[in-house]
Image: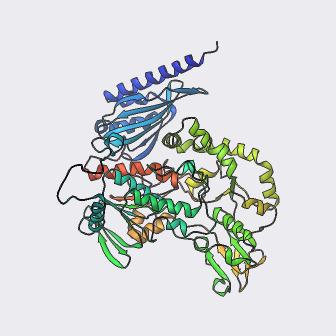
Amino acid sequence: MTQSVDQVASAAASAVNEWLTAFQQALTVRDADAAAALFADESYWRDIVSFTWNIATVEGGAGVAELLRATLDQVDPTGFRVTEEPAEADGVITAWIAFETEAGRGSGLLRLVGGKAFTLLTTLDELKGHEEPVNDRRPNGVRHGAFRDRVTWAESRAREATELGYTVQPEVLIIGGGQGGIALGARLRQLGVPAIIVERNERPGDSWRKRYKSLALHDPVWYDHLPYLPFPASWPVFSPKDKIGDWLEMYAKVMELNYWGSTTCKSAVREGDGWAVVVDRDGEEVTLRPRQLVLALGASGLPVVPDFPGREKFRGDQHHSSAHPGPDQYKGKKAVVVGSNNSAHDICAALWEAGADVTMVQRSSTHVVRSDSLMDLGLSDLYSERALAAGMTTFKADTIFASLPFRILHTLQTPVYNAIRERDAEFYRRLEQAGFDLDFGEDDSGLFLKYLRRGSGYYIDVGACELVANGAVKLAKGQVAELTEDEVVLGDGTRLPADLVVYATGYGSMNQLAAGIIGQDMADKVGKVWGLGSGTTKDPGPWEGELRNMWKPTAQEGLWFHGGNLALSRYYSLYLALQLKARMEGMPTPVFRRAEVHHAE
């Protein structure tokens, strides 16, 4: 007998309420085993700060019981409830939930299969007594009445800028003023945490402005909002680099961030329960003494410039893609671009458009996905105009994605990329016919898993692949053996005449940058940053289940890492900010299952 829509909805609501009631009862009486019995044999509980003061995923009943035995007395969770009508599809009931802990208020997402939890996400949304001043808590902005020696908002901001870092020390120092540092700075500002962002470039957004001329975001606008201030409804789908740079500069100003441009960090050493950080602020040496140090260095390190034999002989221009000035001066020149990922394709296309004779050197296979297909099949349910019209908010989209355990994420992504491969079969056939080496990741899981595991090895195609397929951009394959005065010579003897060589050869690890700031010994103490421990190329095991050292406590007290693309920076900046605020306020923050250190660099 077929159930009506109302009957299915009622059954889903009953199942969720029954599960939440049993779960809350077990938590109340501190019965970890009873709570664990509510989870399926294959199940995953991902907690972001609310129970663990960490970002951690436990698996199966044994993992749930371990987490609860370690945290229940301190956390004292109460009030588990649904916040909207549960939904059922394909035998999976999905429910948005809320709850409270001793420290704060949280929310999450529950999936039930056969009456038991398959996945549970719990996140800490705010700290009790330290809520953000929003909506009915927003500040007045002015003190009505007549008062002698009134201090205006502008005078107050000017005083803060004069004092912070000199007569008043910041609680948090953020090294790195790109989108990650700016997003975190905004979160901390709203939480009342005194913070300074230091950035080597002069202005917010310069890290984008100074990249190659044709650079634009390959992610769509719905995926890229910053906290608090979403892009306008008229903002382009794909943001040009200079437009993003201007937005970041505006954002830093209106969010009242203490942003020190033209500032480089010379050293950072542990001193008592804080740090002594020496910076050069536009020629002035300043020692800052924050309690918490955040390295917001993106997801990679220094540019990798291969030391090919003969580089010193080459008479033309040669530079890393990060230093590429743009294509205009190379019209009519012979350009060789070493590499075949995002930057390589973008630069090849821009050089071709400017009238250069372009050759791409592919040294290893590359995962390629067409932008339209990625948007339609990979992102549109969560981040698109269609998703917005269906009631999908940015926070809900982020939460849904965060609720997917990394252990099984590849199994969920593989069907998406199988569909993309089928949809774009002719596109891939033509690329391979041109000699281009393609891959879809070691387990066919595609773009996002490659990004999480290694941060490289892919290209989101916005048109350059057609130039490769039709031969307008020539393709050479193999390793570079040497450079001569006017050629790039490959291992098989192929000689490529060149007036310009661009090394689109990627970046080193974030650990390299960290070591230059905190010293190699401390960087080794913390271990590898980024990667899941999947055992795939450039992501050595053992399995950790979360991104290593990102947005959570590290092996060094008071040292944190923040970064990633705009979406990750937006989402996880909240949870890092809450951890920092809790420590500033002296709240107990016992960390469950602090990650082990692997692969010191």
User: For this rendering, which residue is in front, 38 or 351?
Assistant: 351
User: For this rendering, which residue is in front, 126 or 192?
Assistant: 192
Question: Is residue 211 toward the left or the right of residue 151 in the image?
Answer: right
The percent coordinates of residue 381 (x first, y second) are 60, 39
Q: How many marks?
A: 0
388 over 557 or under it: above or below: above
**Residue drawn where x is 50% and y is 68% of the image:** 206
The percent coordinates of residue 2 (x first, y second) are 64, 15
415 over 192 or under it: above or below: above
Q: Residue 328, located in which quarter of the rendered image?
A: bottom right
Which residue of the protein is positioned furthest toward the left in this rendering?
148
User: For this rendering, which residue is in front, 285 or 437?
Assistant: 285
Question: Is residue 165 toward the left or the right of residue 554 in the image?
Answer: left
Tell me if I can see residue 493 in this picture.
no
The percent coordinates of residue 16 (x first, y second) are 47, 24
Question: Is residue 468 toward the left or the right of residue 521 in the image?
Answer: right
Tell me if I can see residue 130 in this picture.
yes
Pick the quarter of the image with the N terminus. top right
**Residue drawn where x is 18% and y is 60% of the image:** 149
Colouring style: rainbow
Which residue of the protein is positioned furthest toward the front in this rendering?
146
The percent coordinates of residue 100 (x first, y second) are 34, 34
**Residue drawn where x is 31% and y is 55% of the image:** 193
User: For this rendering, which residue is in front, 7 or 54?
Assistant: 7
**Residue drawn where x is 44% and y is 29% of the image:** 83
